[in-house]
Amino acid sequence: FQMLSNGHSLLLAYDPQPVRMDTIVTGGDSSAIVIGLIVQEIDINKNVVFQWRSWDHYQITDATEDINLTQHTIDYVHGNAIELDFDGNLLISSRHMDEITKVNRQTGEIIWRLGGLKSRNNQFQFINDPITFSHQHDIRRLSNGNVTLYDNGNLHIPKISRAREYK
């Protein structure tokens, strides 16, 4: 949840849905519950003025390799932070995809995907950070234009956690 200066609020919500995972991955559960992500902007009168759903823009198989897609309950996105970017668009942190996604707040289309260690959709090159990030939290845009996040480091060998700032 994040309050905006115009009185609107940004919300992250989990959205469990039944999915026949046996049609998506070998050994998948035919009655799995897969947890998607919904982002909403709500105005001062509690009307939804913008909604974005992971179901419409991500694939379940975008999850990193440590997320077991054969389990009964699968949290493939695990959205954990949202940030209103300087240009009015949104930055979304998806922990189980090792990804920060920039989303157009007017159309819902993905603008870019910044992926960490095991991301399947990274569109950027990292300079001076060969291990990038893993299962991050707390994406923030700084006044200098840089992005910070907390790297939980779950998939690093050895496991390390650290704060990161990227230009």
Image (cartoon, grey):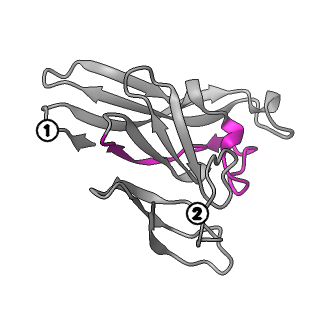
Percent coordinates x, y for residue 50 in the rendering? 34, 22
Residue at image point 62% right, 27% down: 18
Marks 2/1: CA–CA distance: 31 Å
As displayed, is residue 35 above or below residue 81?
A: above
Percent coordinates x, y for residue 140 in the rendering? 35, 55
Which amino acid is tagged 2? Ser
Q: Quadrant of residue 12?
A: top left
Q: Quadrant of residue 17?
A: top right
The residue tagged with tag 2: helix, strand or loop?
A: loop
As displayed, is residue 111 above or below residue 157?
A: above
Percent coordinates x, y for residue 65 in the rendering? 73, 54
Q: Which residues are magenta?
A: 60-86
Rendered-image quadrant of the N terminus: top left
Nearer to us in this view, 5 or 126: 126
As displayed, is residue 138 above or below residue 15?
A: below
Rendered-image quadrant of the C terminus: bottom left
Percent coordinates x, y for residue 87 in the rendering? 32, 36
Q: How many residues crowd around disc 1 within 10 Å: few (fewer than 14), some, or many (20 or more)?
A: few
The residue tagged with tag 1: helix, strand or loop?
A: loop
Horizontal relation, residue 92 to residue 158: left or right = left
Q: How many residues crowd around disc 2 within 10 Å: few (fewer than 14), some, or many (20 or more)?
A: many
- Tell me the number on the disc at residue 134: 2
Residue at image point 34% right, 45% down: 83
Which amino acid is tagged 1? Ser
Compare marks 2 and 1 and give the one earlier in the sequence: 1
8 within the magenta span: no
84 within the magenta span: yes
Horizontal relation, residue 1 to residue 18: left or right = left
Residue at image point 53% right, 53% down: 95
Nearer to us in this view, 127 or 158: 127
Check if mark 2's residue and mark 1's residue have beta carbons within 8 Å. Answer: no
Q: Would you name the residue on which mark 1 appears?
A: 5
